[in-house]
Structures are given as structure tokens and as C-alpha cells.
Image: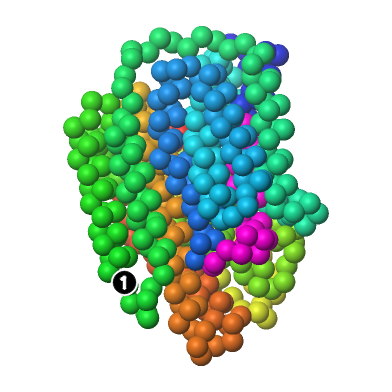
Amino acid sequence: MSDRISKANMLLLIIVCFAQFIEVMNSSTVVVALPSIQTALHMQANDLQWIVTSYVLTFACFLMIGGRASDLLGRKRVLLVGLTVFALASLAGALSMNPVWLIASRAIQGIGAALSIPAAMSLISNNFPAGAQRNKAFGIFGALGSGGAAAGSIVGGLLTDSAGWRSLFYLNVPLALLLIVGLIFVKVSPSAKVEKQSIDLIGLISVLAGIFILVYSISMPDVNGSWPITKITMLIVGILVLLLFVVIEKYAKNPLMPLRLFKFRSLLTSNFIGFLMFSYVSGFNYFSTLYFHELGYSSLKVGLAFLPLGLTAIVVTQITPFFMSKFGAKKVLVITQIVNALGMFWLSDMDMNKGYASFVLPAFIILGLSVGASYTAVIVGSVQDVKPEEHGIAGGIVNTFLQLGGSLGLSILATVATTVTASAEHHEMANNAVLLGFRTALIVSGAFAIIAVILALMSGGKSKDTVSVSQEMHI
């Protein structure tokens, strides 16, 4: 069969690829604008991380619902709904008058993205024939996803400096509307009829509530250097709710997260490695942004500073499958997690006198390569022992773990930083106390990476066979 894509399918591909592009780009643009948002809305340091966490948390928890809904209700319909939700939430974010308003709009944006991206991927699977055309389509889809992250830092910096942080949210509205109009008129193949299945709403509510309670309790401030009883109680409640989620999934007819798949050691370890990896990656992105702000960087300069990180990650994801076919996913995971740990420890030496070219740039280039490669290896490791017909479920599970790591892990690291800063302010100058908090959080990030190394050594994955996981890789 020819690998040429028809004009109708090319239009569909452009729409679904740019749907992912703007949603991924949105995450990067907002991170760059955090200092400006903090100043404009008079936010406390320990509340700032919720701008990132609220989006990632709802995105993670609604991913599988989005995938199930696209199968049951129609992929085109669900993508239209997801883009509409994303556009309306972006408009609400642009009009935010206080932190609660902004954080709530970010959470709804995450729901819109969680509905959109699985539906977009399903449209590619359903409209492009297996083989060269589908592989080419997913290659373009993945490249634009990675490109969105890289472009977001530049777009975020440019718009924040020239038009203000609200423009980042306003920008999403016309872009999403343009995609919605295009999608209405484009023709898609009819979805295969799927047996009606119930959606695990109880499981969704319990995991969302459990993670939210944990994240909120971790971010609660300490009292005189110790944990108040309210914080301890909420931590216990959050853990109990997540245990309840596990019980619900065990007996659910159509579970959100089928526990039977965790019998595969490679999937189990890949999920936890991915959870830890997104914890420290979210952390070093967050703290690096605030560090650049402490150095007096403009938003545009911050965006340019992150560009090498994004570009090297894009390059390495294209060549990682070759190294995995030669050495196996396990060796790639072990090596990359060691490099990631060293990168975290290197960055933990940050101070006001370090230069970007000599200190930050080498770390960003190396971390871009190692994080990009380890991400690919985590995805491959999560599906390599799973039956081909269950790759979609396994891919959904690992991507959920990745995003939950980003929300819960960032909350832990941000709490570490603010606690250390608050304790040091009595003995240090303000800038020194803030940097001490950042450095401590990055040391903890390095510890997370070391734990990931240990898990990688314990994983299966001796086979050097790579798995075709284009669909799962780019959620």
C-alpha cells in the first residue's frame, strides 16, 4: 500500500496534530510565566506550584476516561468537546482575578486536554491504514507534540514580555476555535461499533480525590517547623482514599486501571520509574524557572534558556529506538537515570554567580538527551511483556503514572523548597535562603533519580526487541 497520505486525511492529520501542539505548548508557556503570574495575582510561593499541579492532576486522572469516551461516544465528537472545554477554560484563565480562579481554570484545561489527546490519537489509528501511512502520521503527531514543548518556552517568554501573561491564555481561544471549525467540516471514518461499557466514575472520583488530598496536605505550611495535626490527618486520609481506589479497581466491572496488568514486572517498574522521573523533571523545570527569575532574566530570556533542553529531547527521541534495539530498554533506563541523577546534583550547586553557558547549558543539553531517552525507554518497558491487544491500556496506565508523578512529585519538592527557605530566612539573606530551598529540592530530585536507577536494575526487559509504541508514546 502507498505511503502517500490523501488530501482529506492530511487535513485531519493537521487538525489533530495541532490540537496536541497547542495543548502541549500551553503547559510550557505557563511555566515560563510563573514569576509574572505570582507578582500580578500576589501569590504565595507555596501556592505557585498549584498553577502547574492543577493542570497535570486533572489531565492524569481524566486520560483514561478520555480514551474510553472516544471509543464509546465517537472520536470526532469527543475531540470537539475536549477542544471546546480547553478553549473556554483558557478564556476563564485569561480573565482570572485571583489565584483560586486561575487554578480552577487550569484544572478544567487539564480535563479538556485529557479528552482531546486520546481522541486525536484514536482518529489517527482509525483513519490511517496500518503500516507506512499510520507510522508516518504518528511520527508527525509525536514530533509536533515535542515541538510544542520547545516552542512553548519561546512563545511564553515573548508574549509575557510583550503583552503580559494573560495573552498566553487568550492565544488558545482563537487557535482552538479554528481547529473546531476545521474538525466540523472534515470527514472521518466511522468508528467501529463498540459494546456499551460503563465508565468507572467511582474509580475516577476516588483517585482524583486521593491525589488531590495528598497534594493539598503536602503543600500545607508547617507550624514552627513541625507538621500540624490537620496536615497529618489529611495525609492519612489521602492514603486511605487511594487504597480505596485500589479496592474499587479490583472489583470494578470495567476498571479505570486494570490491576491484572501489574503482574508484569516490566510494566510495574516502568510505571514507578516514570512516576519518579516526572516528579524530578517537573521539579527541575519549576525551580530552574524561578532560579532564572532570581538572576533577573526576562520571560523571553527564560524561554530561550530552556530551548536547548527541548531541542535535544526532540532529537534523542528519534534515535533512542536504535539504542534500545542494540542494548535493550533496561540498560538504556539504568544509564539515563544515572545521568539524570548526576544532572540534578549538578544543578543543585546553583548560586547567583554561576554563568548560564558554563553551568546551566551543559546540564540542560545532557538532561535533554537523557530525559528524552529515558521517557522512550519507560514507554517501551511498560508494554514489552503485554499482549499487543492491551498495549493501549498499558500505555494509558503508564502515562497516567507519569502525569501523577508530575503533580504529586512537584508538590513534594515545592514543599521541601519553601520549608527550607522559611527556616533559613532567619540566618540568611533573602536570595540566599530562596536558593538554599531550590538546592535542597534538587538534591531530593537527585535522590528520586537514584531510586529510579535501583528500580531499573530490578526490572525485566532483557530482550533487545523494540516494540512499536508510537501510539502510546505521545500521550
Density class for disc 1 (Cα within 10 Å; few <14, some 14-19, many ≥20) is few
Q: Is residue 306 visible?
A: no
Give me the residue at 39% from left, 57% from top: 216
Quadrant into which the N terminus falls: top right
Vertical side of 422 occupied by 396: above or below: above
Front residue of 56/238: it is 238
Front residue of 8/193: it is 193
Query: Where does the image place residue 133, in percent across and percent down from the top left?
Result: 59, 19
Per the image, is 458 magenta? no
Front residue of 25/323: it is 25
Chief secondary structure of the magenta portion: helix
**Amino acid type, label 1:** Pro
Would residue 281 be found to the left or right of residue 211 on screen?
right
Q: Is residue 423 visible?
A: yes
User: Label 1: which residue?
Assistant: 228
Instruction: State the image quarter where residue 254 is shown.
Output: top left
Query: Where does the image place residue 82, in percent across and percent down from the top left?
Result: 54, 29
Query: Where does the image place residue 440, in percent across and percent down from the top left?
Result: 47, 74
User: Which residues, given as a range, are shown in magenta?
Assistant: 18-45
Would residue 193 be found to the left or right of residue 350 on screen?
left
Vertical side of 355 occupied by 332: above or below: above
Give me the residue at 40% from left, 40% from top: 61
Query: Where does the image place residue 433, in percent across and percent down from the top left?
Result: 54, 81
Q: How is the image coloured?
A: rainbow
Q: Residue furthest right?
A: 162
